[in-house]
């Protein structure tokens, strides 16, 4: 999707940087890291609010009592629709950074969050039709798409050796927007009651305006990054894009799906009141978000594939605890298992995203590329792949909410869905081992070539 351009004409405006080479340590230490950190800071702010808006219906569902006339299945479907739209929009959002510039697109995408927030301020009351709520749920999807443009943009600012940390910080700071909106929802319910959802929405209007203004004031566009439609086509043909998408469904798809569904499950399976549910729902997303940079740092240190492998094993164990708690109707055990799952999704989110640039740097070595040529190849393919992987991974949120909806319709609880999730994590464990750690005969020569070209970039270390 993106690649350095040495022949394109300079862009007009003071916020365009025409020369950028983060792999040059002299440049990085002198000025690159300061610019990158500034852009990371305000990218996180915009993405953070985007996640809050995207997950807004998971909080508003706690305010929607019997007077709204929407059953549990209907509420699960609203959050599933928001999840679907956010996932689909991640593809064009990811490509928009190279087309319009990271700063420019952040300004636009942050300002666009006013549309769903204002719409909810208008319609959030009993008597509003389900069709209207569905239309606004579609609008909230734009918040989820911010992730793709933010990650693609920050990926271009940082050198390979720091991508795990940088992408983990960027994504973790964004993900925590889910927990923050849930905490604010808890505060509103506790202070003014469940009949006042507009108070929560009113808080976000000035925050969105502030994020838009700060992005315009402090962020930069990278001139050397340009659209490369060939990279998108190459990424679609690349098997690793689809394998990593499958794994990212298990990590990020689980994180966002559980974030949207946790409060609804507590209400409908364990009979919690809106206030009781709200007092618990924020804990998992908060811990999962805070731990994401740690997953990236662990991947930088010992290899993303190894971290991802054992993380899926632990996710399967934690899901087994959730299944047991669901069958036994044990709320303390259920909460413990779910919080463990949230933490593990955060670690896995960091490690899987670290794997992506490492995979393509290893492939560059296998092709005999080195130095700047290898960096260009890896940046080009990883940038295109991130947009696609992020979009497909987010569909896991849709799958989780639709699975829980069907499970509640069929058996009155989420047990059946949780068993399906456990099986998925076991399969992800097997795929990670088979493709990135076992080194089967078909991939042996490529992995070996990558190791010989630059040992630290073998698949075992991605």
Image (cartoon, rainbow, N blue to C red):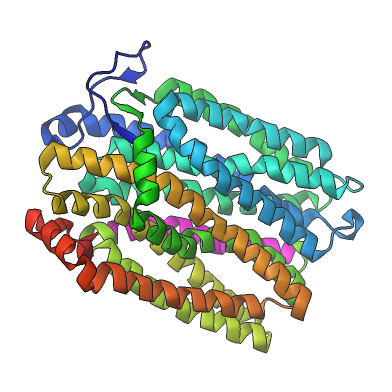
Instruction: Examine the residues drawn in magenta and state their main secondary structure.
Output: helix
Of residues 210 and 322, which is closer to you in this image?
Answer: 322
Hey, which quadrant is residue 61 in on the image? bottom right
In this picture, residue 107 sits left or right of residue 373: right
The vertical placement of 37 against 337, above or below, is above
**The residue positioned farthest toward the top in the image shown:** 12
Q: Is residue 282 something one can see in this rendering?
A: no
Hey, which quadrant is residue 337 in on the image? bottom right
In this picture, residue 267 sits left or right of residue 294: right
Q: The C terminus appears in which quarter of the rendering?
A: bottom left
Please name the residue shown 59% across and 64% down the image: 258
Q: Is residue 422 something one can see in this rendering?
A: yes
Q: Is residue 277 magenta?
A: yes
Whole-percent x and y of residue 64? 81, 55
Whole-percent x and y of residue 119? 76, 35
Please name the residue shown 42% across and 71% down the image: 428
Please name the residue shown 28% across and 47% down the image: 163
Please name the residue shown 34% across and 18% down the image: 16
The residue stretch that appears in magenta: 275-297
Q: The N terminus appears in which quarter of the rendering?
A: top left
The vertical placement of 265 against 282, above or below, is below
Q: Is residue 29 magenta?
A: no
Of residues 337 and 435, which is closer to you in this image?
Answer: 435
Whole-percent x and y of residue 297? 28, 57
Of residues 279 and 5, which is closer to you in this image?
Answer: 5
The vertical placement of 227 against 332, above or below, is above
In this picture, residue 320 sits left or right of residue 185: left
Of residues 75 and 270, which is closer to you in this image?
Answer: 75
Hey, which quadrant is residue 380 in on the image? top left
In this picture, residue 460 sits left or right of residue 343: left
Whole-percent x and y of residue 458? 17, 60
The vertical placement of 306 against 346, above or below, is below
């Amino acid at each position: 999707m993106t690649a350095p351009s040495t022949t394109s004409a300079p862009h007009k405006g003071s916020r365009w940087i025409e020369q950028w080479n983060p792999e040059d340590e002299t440049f990085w230490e002198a000025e690159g890291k300061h610019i990158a950190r500034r852009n990371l800071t305000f990218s996180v702010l915009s993405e953070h609010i985007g996640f809050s808006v995207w997950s807004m219906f998971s909080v508003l569902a706690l305010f929607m009592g019997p007077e709204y006339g929407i059953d549990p299945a209907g509420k699960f479907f609203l959050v599933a629709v928001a999840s679907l739209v956010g996932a689909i929009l991640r593809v064009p959002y990811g490509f928009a950074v190279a087309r319009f510039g990271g700063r420019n697109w952040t300004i636009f995408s942050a300002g666009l969050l006013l549309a769903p927030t204002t719409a909810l301020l208008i319609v959030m009351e009993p008597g509003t039709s389900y069709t209207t709520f569905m239309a606004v749920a579609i609008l909230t999807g734009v918040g989820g798409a911010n992730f793709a443009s933010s990650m693609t943009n920050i990926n271009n600012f940082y050198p390979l050796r720091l991508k795990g940390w940088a992408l983990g910080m960027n994504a973790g700071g964004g993900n925590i927007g889910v927990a923050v909106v849930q905490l604010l929802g808890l505060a509103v319910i506790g202070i003014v009651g469940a009949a006042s959802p507009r108070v929560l929405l009113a808080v976000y209007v000035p925050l969105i305006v502030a994020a838009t203004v700060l992005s315009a004031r402090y962020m930069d566009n990278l001139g050397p990054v340009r659209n490369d439609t060939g990279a998108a086509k190459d990424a679609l043909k690349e098997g690793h894009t689809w394998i990593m998408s499958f794994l990212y469904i298990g990590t990020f798809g689980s994180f966002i799906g559980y974030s949207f569904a946790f409060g609804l499950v507590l209400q409908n399976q364990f009979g919690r009141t809106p206030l009781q549910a709200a007092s618990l729902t924020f804990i998992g997303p908060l811990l999962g978000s805070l731990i994401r940079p740690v997953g990236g740092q662990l991947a930088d240190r010992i290899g993303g594939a190894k971290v991802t492998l054992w993380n899926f094993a632990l996710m399967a164990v934690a899901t087994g605890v959730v299944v047991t708690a669901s069958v036994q109707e044990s709320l303390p055990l259920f909460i413990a298992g779910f919080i463990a799952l949230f933490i593990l999704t955060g670690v896995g989110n960091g490690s899987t995203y670290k794997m992506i640039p490492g995979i393509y740097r290893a492939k560059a070595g296998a092709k005999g590329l080195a130095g700047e040529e290898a960096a260009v190849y890896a940046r080009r393919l990883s940038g295109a792949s991130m947009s696609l992987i992020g979009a497909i991974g987010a569909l896991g949120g849709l799958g989780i909410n639709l699975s829980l909806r069907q499970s509640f319709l069929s058996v009155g609880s989420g047990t059946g869905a949780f068993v399906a999730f456990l099986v998925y994590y076991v399969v992800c464990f097997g795929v990670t081992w088979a493709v990135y750690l076992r080194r089967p005969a078909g991939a042996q020569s490529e992995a070996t070539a990558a190791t010989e070209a630059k040992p630290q970039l073998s698949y075992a270390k991605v």
